[in-house]
Amino acid sequence: MFPPMRDRDSLYAPLHLLPLPTNMTWGGKIAYLDRDGVIIRGFESYVNNPDEVFVLDGAPKAVGDLRRLGFRVCIVTNQSPVGRGIWSRENLASIHDKVRSELLSEDADAILDLILHSPYAPWHNSWARKPNPGMLEAGRQIIDAAESSILLSEGDIKFGEEWKNRPSENSSIMVGDRIVDMEAAKAHGTRSFRCNPDVGISDVISEILELNG
């Protein structure tokens, strides 16, 4: 198993969740979001450093709106340059620092509760790499544990057929710009929304808000 990763922490490290807007009670909804083409502009040659982070118009408000609707927000992004040695996990973490900063500069509620990445190349056949649902599975278990103040230990997070008695994801959503995102959502049992990569999440946020209003 090639598991998903967090930027600077172990997958099993405690996750500190900030309160939802107006201190609302979380009802179990997670918005799983791809990164490039959804939150920031993507490039064929990758987003290689923080200076190449360009947040798409409307993305900060869209993320804030999701959290104002009671969603926890979990980024799930394929990042094979890490596994192929093009650049390091620390570089990726610095990119994500910039993404968080840019979102919050426009909307104080645009908090990314968790960021997971798959550093593996396609030939690694990792369950964590979309179109497989490993990042979504891990995101659910990490956020559920954090909400319940449960400390996870190595091996507690289960994947695929090993994960028994998994909760329903009927109220959660996945937003992505590619077929692999839609396939990961389907495998995870989550409703999906495909957006135009030049527009990003603001392309579909009205439909999401209407369905969850």
Image (cartoon, grey):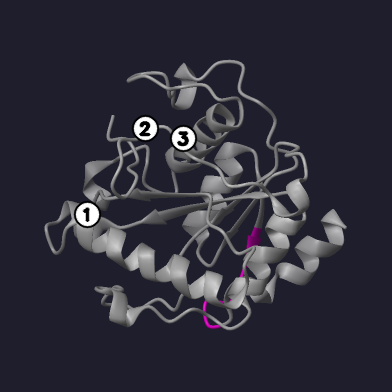
Discs 1/2, front: 2
Crowding near the residue tagged with mark 3, few <14, some 14–19, many ≥20 C-alpha atoms within 10 Å: many
Please give the range of residues in magenta: 193-198
Where is residue 117 drawn, in percent x and y? Answer: 36, 50
Q: Kindly identify which residue carries mark 1.
A: 89
Quarter in which the N terminus is drawn: top left
Magenta stretch, overall SS: loop
Gap between marks 1 and 2 measured at Cα: 16 Å
Name the one closer to the observer, 198 or 104: 104
Please identify, in this view, whether the residue under mark 1 or under mark 3 is nearer the observer: 1
Mark 2 residue type: Ala
Residue 4 in view (yes/no):
yes
| Residue 195 falls inside the magenta stretch | yes
Residue 7 point in image, percent of width and height? 31, 50
Q: Which residue is mark 2?
A: 13
Q: Is residue 90 left or right of residue 102?
A: left
Q: Quadrant of the C terminus?
A: bottom right
Q: Tell me what residue is drawn at x 24 percent, y 73 percent.
A: 48
Q: Earlier in the sequence, mark 1 or mark 3?
A: 1
Q: Nearer the viewer, residue 105 or 202?
A: 105
Count residues near mark 1 (Cα–Cα under 10 Å), then give few for <14, some for 14-19, many for 20+: some
Disc 2 versus disc 3: nearer the observer: 2
Residue 187 is situated, as x and y percent measured from the top left of the image, at: 56, 39
Compared with 117, 9 (above or below) is: above
Q: Which mark is residue 197?
A: none
Which residue is at a point 67% across and 69% down the rendered structure image? Answer: 62
Image quarter of residue 190? top right
Disc number placed over residue 138 in the picture, else none: 3
Mark 1 / mark 2, whichever is N-terminal = 2
